[in-house]
Image: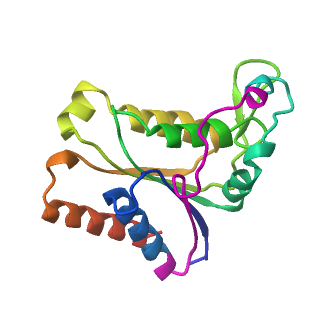
C-alpha cells in the first residue's frame, strides 16, 4: 500500500465533541496504515470563514488573491486525500466549514473559469480520495426523503465534481445524533475505523 498524505478538516467548537472523536479515529486509523495525516482543526486554528472584500473583488478577475489563506491552500495542495468531519446544522455545513470551502477552494486553486463559458475546469487533480464523516440531528428519513440529503449533493455533485476529476467520494453519516445511545456512537466509530482501514 502506497503511503499517502491526507488532510483531515474538523469543524466543531468543542474539543471533546463527538466530531472531534471521529476526526481522531480517522487520524489514528490512517496513521496506523502508514499514511501521513495533517489534522486541521478550524476552530483550534481560529480560521476566519468570512470572504474578504479583496477576495470577492478578485474572484472573477482572472488573478484571484488568496494570499491571506495561503497556508491553508498549501496544505490542501500538499494532500492527495481529503476528509471533512463535521456535524450538520440545519441540514447544512457549519459556517466555519462553508467558509473554509468559500475561501480555500477558489479560482486558481480548486478550479479555473473556462474563458468560453460558465464551466469550471478542475485544478485539484492532486486529490484522489474525498471522504466526509458527519452527524445529523434528524433521523435518516427526514434527511434523505424530506430534505433530499443536501450536504451530500453539495459536496459530491458540487465541490468534488467541480474541483477534481474521477476522485473516490464517500460519505459516512450518523443520523438521529441527538438521541444516539453510547452503543450507537461506538458502532459508528467502528464503522469509520473499518472504512478508513481500507484506504
Q: Position of residue 108 (x, y in %)?
A: 79, 39
Which range is magenta? 31-55
Relative to 132, 99 lies left or right: right
- The part of the image, by quadrant, that contains residue 40 is bottom right
- Residue 85 location (% of width, % of height): 43, 54
Query: Is 52 within the magenta?
Result: yes
Does residue 119 appear to the left or right of 197 in the view shown? right
Tell me if 40 is positioned left or right of 54 in this view: left
State the residue at coordinates (18%, 39%). 139
Q: Position of residue 22 (x, y in %)?
A: 36, 63
Q: Position of residue 188 (x, y in %)?
A: 25, 61
Q: Residue furthest top?
A: 117
Dividing the picture into quadrants, the one containing residue 118 is top right
Q: Residue at x 53, y 58 (%)?
A: 44
Name the residue rendered at 23%, 29% in the picture: 145
- Name the image quarter holding the N terminus: bottom right
In this rendering, the answer to whether 4 lies above or below 137 is: below
The residue closer to the viewer here, 127 or 64, is 64
Determine whether 153 is above or below 171 in the image. Answer: above
Q: Is residue 46 magenta?
A: yes
Query: Residue at image x 18%, y 34%?
Result: 141
Residue positioned most to the right: 63
Amino acid at each position: 500500500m502506497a503511503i499517502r498524505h491526507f488532510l483531515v478538516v474538523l469543524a466543531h467548537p468543542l474539543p471533546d465533541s463527538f466530531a472531534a472523536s471521529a476526526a481522531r479515529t480517522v487520524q489514528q486509523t490512517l496513521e496506523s496504515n502508514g499514511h501521513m495525516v495533517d489534522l486541521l482543526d478550524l476552530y483550534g486554528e481560529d480560521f476566519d470563514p468570512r470572504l474578504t472584500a479583496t477576495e470577492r473583488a478578485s474572484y472573477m478577475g482572472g488573478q484571484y488573491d488568496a494570499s491571506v489563506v495561503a497556508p491553508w491552500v498549501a496544505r490542501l495542495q500538499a494532500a492527495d486525500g481529503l476528509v471533512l468531519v463535521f456535524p450538520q446544522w440545519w441540514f447544512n455545513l457549519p459556517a466555519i466549514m462553508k467558509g473554509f470551502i468559500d475561501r480555500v477552494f477558489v479560482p486558481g486553486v480548486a478550479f479555473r473559469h473556462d474563458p468560453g463559458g460558465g464551466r469550471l475546469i478542475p485544478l485539484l487533480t492532486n486529490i484522489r480520495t474525498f471522504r466526509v464523516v458527519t452527524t445529523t440531528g434528524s433521523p435518516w428519513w427526514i434527511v434523505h426523503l424530506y430534505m433530499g440529503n443536501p450536504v451530500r449533493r453539495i459536496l459530491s455533485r458540487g465541490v468534488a465534481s467541480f474541483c477534481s476529476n474521477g476522485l473516490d467520494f464517500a460519505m459516512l453519516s450518523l443520523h438521529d445524533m441527538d438521541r444516539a445511545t453510547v452503543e450507537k456512537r461506538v458502532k459508528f466509530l467502528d464503522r469509520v475505523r473499518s472504512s478508513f482501514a481500507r484506504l
